[in-house]
Image: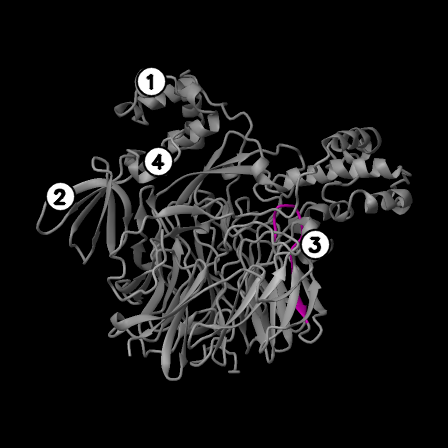
Amino acid sequence: MATIGAQIPADSWPTYHGDYSGRRYSTLKQINTANVKALTLAWVYRINTSRAGAIVGGEGPDTPPPGTPPQIKSTPLMVNGTLYFSVPDHVYAVDARTGRDVWHYAWKTRGGDHIGNRGVGILDNWLYFLTPDNYFVSLDVKTGKERWHHEIASMKREYFSTNAPMIIGRQVIIGVGGDALDIPGYLESRDPEAGNLVWRWNSTPQPGDAGATTWPDEDSMAHGGGMPWLPGTYDPELNLYYFGTGNPQPVLAGSSRPGDNLYTCTIVAINPNTGKMAWHYQVTPHDTHDWDAAQTPILIDGEFNGRPRKLIAQASRNGHYFLLDRATGEHLLTSKHIDSLNWTKGINAKGQPAHDPAKDASVPGTLVSPDTTGATNWPPPSFSPDTGLLYFGTRQTFSVMYLTDTDGRPQGWAAAERNVGNVGNALKAIDYKTGKVKWSRPFAMGPGGTQGGAVGLLSTAGGLLFGNDGGGNFVAYDAATGKPLWHAGLGTNTSNGPETFLLDGRQYIVVGAGDSLYAFALQQ
Amino acid sequence: MTESWPNDVQRGTRGTRRKGFVSAISACSALIVVTVVVASGQQQALTPVADTAAVERGQKLLVDQCGFCHGANARGGSGGPDLTRSVIVQTDEDGKQLGEFLAAGRPDKGMPKFDLPRAQASDLAAFLHQAIYQNSNRRLYKILDIVVGDPSKGQAYFNGQGRCNSCHSPAGDLKGVGAKYEPATLQGRLLLPRGRTGNPGVPLYADPTALQVTVTPPSGEAVSGGLVRLTDFEVTLYEAGSGRMRSWLRNGDTPKVTVTDPLQAHVDHLTRWTDAEMHNMTAYLASLK
């Protein structure tokens, strides 16, 4: 297996992001702006969620619960010519050359939220993944046979797990999700051999801790949320793991938790060996709109104000772009990445959007932009060091948020939301140094107006940016200008981050759309 | 955390059929009807308590025996913590763990012992589990009384700053609108009345409130209709007269495509509303019975 570092290897895709930087930038250029028009389908793999023929494990009943067909949201790992990816309750190993089955593992679920699964982690001969009912499972990479499984959180408290395990050295780092009830978030490291707990980092402080003054009392922080539900990024030189935390609880009502509510909606840097926090930067103090900060914090080695810096950038769900120094957490830049947002009192001295209580959910309704899904979301953004541009999908939605729980101790979401419209979604490319939009491309339109939104992206040294247009097309754009150069009408929007690798000297582009994985290569 | 609910990140545009092969550039010559598929989104691990009589008995027990310390709704009271957030309660099975806890109490924290019969512990648990379920399931949340604005100010805005009267009239298209919709729907529709309610089965592109498009091929007549889909690569429309769907591949500015939104004034207004103006307008329209 190739070494995992700050650069995606040519011949594999060994982590969720391909490397540790989160840039989703590949140095491959066999496919490039000059020849991308000759890109053609190599194979299609449609997932089968039947347990027949699969290796079956799990603690649930023999009959699967009813549900809608899952979407592929995981970015497959590609190791030794095999792709490994997941949807809730299922892991697939597929031959990267042919798109044919190697093995399929099916998990008998006990239930829980099956909204998505980000993928698997692989260390040597072992594969790791999480299930909606909160099991941490290890399989044999070659055969798909289960080695063990451990329960990591209680489904009865509405925890569910979607994260892709992130492997750093001998640490397998996983996080939990869930915000239907007021439960605390945490990130864990598990040992790769037995799956036992090594350390746990809690998203909210204990009484007496530094962040405790940002909560009114012990009860509120013990039920304060902050789910770290997406894989993060890692700087091997600084030995720091970076990730974003989820929103505070109760979600849309902040009356019982006055204060900034650390460490929710926060970019956090921790030592992956110990789980000890090195620094933190909260991108939404006292969030009341479900705008977690889980979006990928991207590591950029580049110039800022005339000198080279180790930077970390996030296009955040709250509609703002943040640039920090990743060694220290020093704030460098904040800018708005959508125009419609209407919920802040401006930017405070620390560069944070200042909470405006007038835009909290209210009984007669508060018109808020963006809606709770946010200005952007989990689908992986991309950064190209060639263009210096950060690419991500944006939404300018409006919704009315109605406070429904007027108790002094509101619970859960505590409010209802009605979507009412949108003033334009677009794929954007921003200059990482200034936060200014270099180019912006509106997404497809349907009978109700603009479509699209957050989109999984990949940039390459071939000058290309791969993503979808919100209208069911998989598109290769000129990364410098945003001009579409090639597309495939898949009929459904891509649903994961595209990836690329070289196999037998041929460059492949692989992307998931709904229930199918598509591979493209140059016509031979 | 939720990645999305109830919004459109979870939605996809899904073809009516799967294309077996996709070639460069011109892959989409076949008509593909785009429908919005709302995925299941949030799914609950918890389910409602089936035995409603047990829930009622449990509620009475709670009010009588626990309410003083833990509140009549179990969310905490004078000194006692919120029971619906309790890990013991949340992970309890049918009163078993709760009953065991009550039998021992927590004397160090001032929680006395309660030796409840098994059936009563089960009832108490039924009430608490139902309360937890209701807290957790935001689909069940009830929007409260939202008609709190000043109807006369709403009327003034309608005829003045809002310029609503340039298209609408209380005696015409809005006659009886206050009786037609419940208030939250009314409020949503005054912001953006896209699509007709009570008309299931009619796709949005066939509705007059859909975006409209005119396509003019280099040689040939302009064709207009409801917009089905416009991307950089294709445009598809629905001709109401013939009931036909038609599509063209796009190559830069060819064919010429012009999109209009019959609700553009509403879309533009989204960025201008204050919450007070919105509440006043809701009150005014709600008064048009």
**Could you tell me which residue is drawn at 72 percent across and 55 percent down?**
A206
Mark 4 = which residue? B202
Expressed as whole percent of the image width and height from the top left, the position of residue B34 reads 34, 48
Label 2 crowd bin: few (<14), some (14–19), many (20+), radius 10 Å:
few
Q: Which residues are magenta?
A: A178-190
What label does residue B120 carry, if any?
none
Q: Secondary structure at mark 2?
A: loop
Where disc 3 sits, the SS reads loop
Check if mark 4's residue and mark 1's residue have beta carbons within 8 Å.
no
**In the depicted structure, whether residue B39 falls above or below residue A323:** above
Q: What amino acid is found at the position of numbered circle 4 in the picture?
A: Val
For residue B158, side relative to residue A1 (left or right): left
CA distance separating discs 3 and 1? 54 Å
Against A235, is A412 above or below? above
Q: Is residue A455 magenta?
A: no
SS at mark 4 in the image: loop
Figure quadrant of residue B252: bottom left
